Image (cartoon, rainbow, N blue to C red):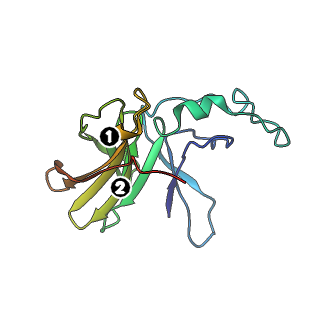
Amino acid sequence: IYTSAVLKAQVGMGPSGLGAIYAIDVDGVNPPSLLTTIPNVGTIGSDIDRNLGDFNDRAFDSTAVQVIGTVGLGDMEISEDFASLYVTNLNQKTIEQVDVATGTVIQSITIPDPGCTGGDFQPWALKLDGEKLYVGGVCNAITSQDRNDMTAVVYQMNLSNNQFSGPVLDFSLDYDRD
């Protein structure tokens, strides 16, 4: 099993930081081990800098709240032959392909920007279907603060040539929330 570090408010990071991907032995014989660390994922202060040292203190983690979804790693998928991991680098807005056998980043693929109005595109989601990798994200309306500018977008990437098509799905996120 492979798992990665994910930034959340009020939660400390593991020993290898924001870009860490760990291998977990399903038999439980060996402890989790570091497979690789994805470079250029952005930064976050230490647990102490974020005032997370005292678990009885309900500190407000203002550092993390400002950058959640924009630094670190997003979703991760494994290839059908179990040879490659695909992981979203939130800071670079790329898909990192990792060779499972060596832990080496094979390639970094830039995710298309849909040209958001009033904000930034923040990719996160991945779904592998045969030779197609679906990549989802949102236009966050961070600048305009207008919910009419919030949209979800899904692209399709052909794994044989890393070419994107789409968006194959896009829809507004401007609905009322009760």
Q: Nearer the viewer, residue 25 or 89?
A: 89
Image check: 48 left or right of 137? Answer: right
Closer to the N terminus: mark 2 or mark 1? 1
Contact check, label 2 and label 1, Cβ < 8 Å: no
As measured in the structure, the alpha-carbon distance from the residue carrying label 2 to the one carrying label 1 is 11 Å
Residue 91 percent location from the top left of the image: 41, 33
Residue to which mark 2 is pinned? 126
Q: Is residue 84 visible?
A: no
Q: How many numbered tags mark residues here?
A: 2
Task: Give percent across and percent down for residue 138.
Answer: 37, 44
The residue that disc 1 covers is: 94
Under circle 2, the secondary element is: strand
Which amino acid does the dot numbered 2 rest on?
Leu
Who's the residue at 75% across and 30% down the image?
51
Q: Helix or strand or loop: what does disc 1 sit on?
A: strand
What amino acid does circle 1 point to? Thr
Q: Residues within 10 Å of mark 2 (few under 14, many from 20)?
A: many
Against 87, is 48 above or below? above
